[in-house]
Image: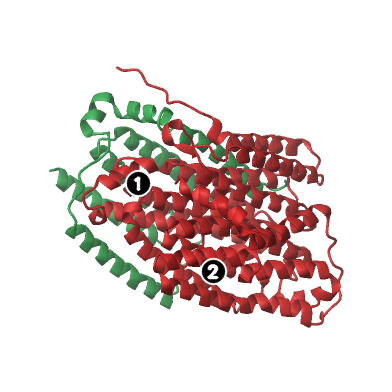
Chain colours: A red, B green
Amino acid sequence: MDMISIPVVNMTPILPEIFLSVLAMVLLLLNVFSPSGKKSYLAYISFIGIAATAVLVGAGWGGHIESFSGAVILDNFATFFKMIFLLAAGLTVLISDQYMEREECNHGELYPLILFTVVGMMLMASGTDLMTIFLGLEVMSVSLYVLAGFNRNNKKSNEAGLKYFLLGAFSTGFLLYGMALTYGATGTTRVYKIASVVGQMTLPSANIMLLAGMLLMMTGFAFKIAAAPFHMWTPDVYEGAPTPMTAFMSAGPKAAGFAALLRILLVALPTLQIEWSQLLWVLAVLTMTVGNITALRQDNIKRMLAYSSIAHAGYALVGLVAGNGTGTAGILFYMLSYAFMNIGAFAIIILVSKKGETNGNVMDFAGLGFKRPLLAVAMTIFLFSLAGMPPTAGFIGKFYLFSGAVQKGYIWLAVIGVLNSAASVYYYLRVMVYMYMKEPTEEFEWTQVTAPVALALIISVAGSMIPGIVPSFILEFAQQAVKLI
Amino acid sequence: METLFFAIVSLVAIISAILVITCKNPINSALSLIMTFFCLATYYVMLDAPFMAAVQVMVYAGAIMVLIVFTIMLLNIRVNATQKHSHRILLGSIIGFFTLINTIVLLVKSQAAKPVGPFTGDMIRNIGHSELIGREMFTTFLLPFEITSILLLVAIVGSVILAKKNI
């Protein structure tokens, strides 16, 4: 009997994950010992923790360390995505406290769960083993199911949690089956080893098992990024979940899904690029069109942004269809700016809506431009950025995504994308029309803007504007990030 | 001989799986599910994976099924026989049917792939299935193994938040 050789364990790549997990456990304990109703300090601690983790993650920029015998990696790609997750979580924590206080569900477990979600997402971005990616996805999803149903007194929130859980579990089945088949076809779960095994196959596109595995994995991830036709859960869940969690869900997990999808498709299965890019072409067109057309008819603003988030997943898929440097760097850039603009928009929705999630229609924005001009200006910037108007971050992001597609010869895809983007302007502008050109139907007291929310708004406005004016700075990071994978 | 055995087990598995979703009484469904799990365990034995088979029987057919049956009894679900056949079900069945045909055609056309990877049937018989799993778990899959602990913690916290009366 030979001795078992313990693999070399280098903790550096998962240091941020360990730090956040420990912080989350400490917060869970602190929560037990603090009197109910006084949980706000947990939000501050988690925000500081997230900021500290961001420093920790940032220090790893430029490194390239594999650890746990190839189960996890520290590279620029993972670092860039980890920054997006931390940003989304940080902004969410800032806008959560006031909202949870108002909805009377300020339970301290909220913050540890957000942190655990980030841990899961980070593992998805840095995992180079299908098992790591899968378990990261599960940690993320299980936390999100709870966060979606966090407002226990609200029926819609319960429905959102249950619906997300059932459909999420269903999609996890697809994903896991796909991973199992891929393992069966290649004999390994390591992403880089899969690449070399598939590369040595004489005709990988004739290997049914591998193709089925790829297909099922793509189905699983398409569900997580809310791509049509796997988007059915999105509007109900986004509408029912507590608004800060909706903001978080639309920014963080979507980016995490793209991180894992990019890693698997571009690193493990580049030899099948012709096959998967054809599939994604159809998926991208469907996602953009279904999202935008359905969003046109929505009156509830959370539902509208849910459909718009489906459309945005479609735009990002355009970059993945292209699969070249410009397109994939565009995805990274877009996910980052999308986190800023979307969470910012949801922060304003929180301020406009009233207790019990009422006042969430587009009509309720009537007169915002006169009563709270600053909030209206901020909302205008977010909406312009979502619509992809220059000089905002959304414009530059879409520009890179579509130019990546054009470079690869997908002219029609880019044309459909631009047409979709033009159609989306209608429903974003509709909110602006209500804000600036309609009189409010009824008087009511506006929610006070607390300091954390103001900070979140300032960060979001800056994040939606600055990358649009000086894009080269962030794009350079994004290009370096996709160079190594 | 092995093929015949496989065919019989598969037939039982498929019939009991269909019974799980067609039975009106939830207890009958649960019992059919146990049958399906046993068939799966048989597959594991045929694939040289006795440890997996034992775990399958103990965890799924044993522990989880007891949980499911208890939940059904405690909830005291009434049988609702109202079923609605909408166009969506028809559409779904048509798509499902053609996907099935497509899959069968593809499977018949393709050649059976040879087993790949470092683990062969002989290796499992010589070293032992549970030992191989244990080794892999604590060497190759050390990190995923550790992540499951976080996953379990999240699940516990989540169920307490969603289900506890006063928090």
Quadrant holding the N terminus of chain A: top left
Query: Which of the 4 quarters of the picture holds residue A53?
Result: top right
- Residue in the picture at 48% in, 66% down: A403
Q: Is residue A354 left or right of residue A465?
A: right
Closer-to-camera residue (B71/A418):
A418
Residue on which the image places disc 2: A311
The chain to which mark 1 is attached is A
On screen, residue B76 versus residue A194, left or right, reads right
**Chain designation of label 2:** A
Seen in the image, is A33 located left or right of residue A206?
right
**Residue A14 percent across, percent down from the top left:** 55, 35
| Residue identified by numbered label 1 | A180
| Residue B91 visible somewhere in the drawing | yes
Q: Secondary structure at mark 2?
A: helix
Mark 1 residue type: Ala
| Lower sequence index among marks 1 and 2 | 1
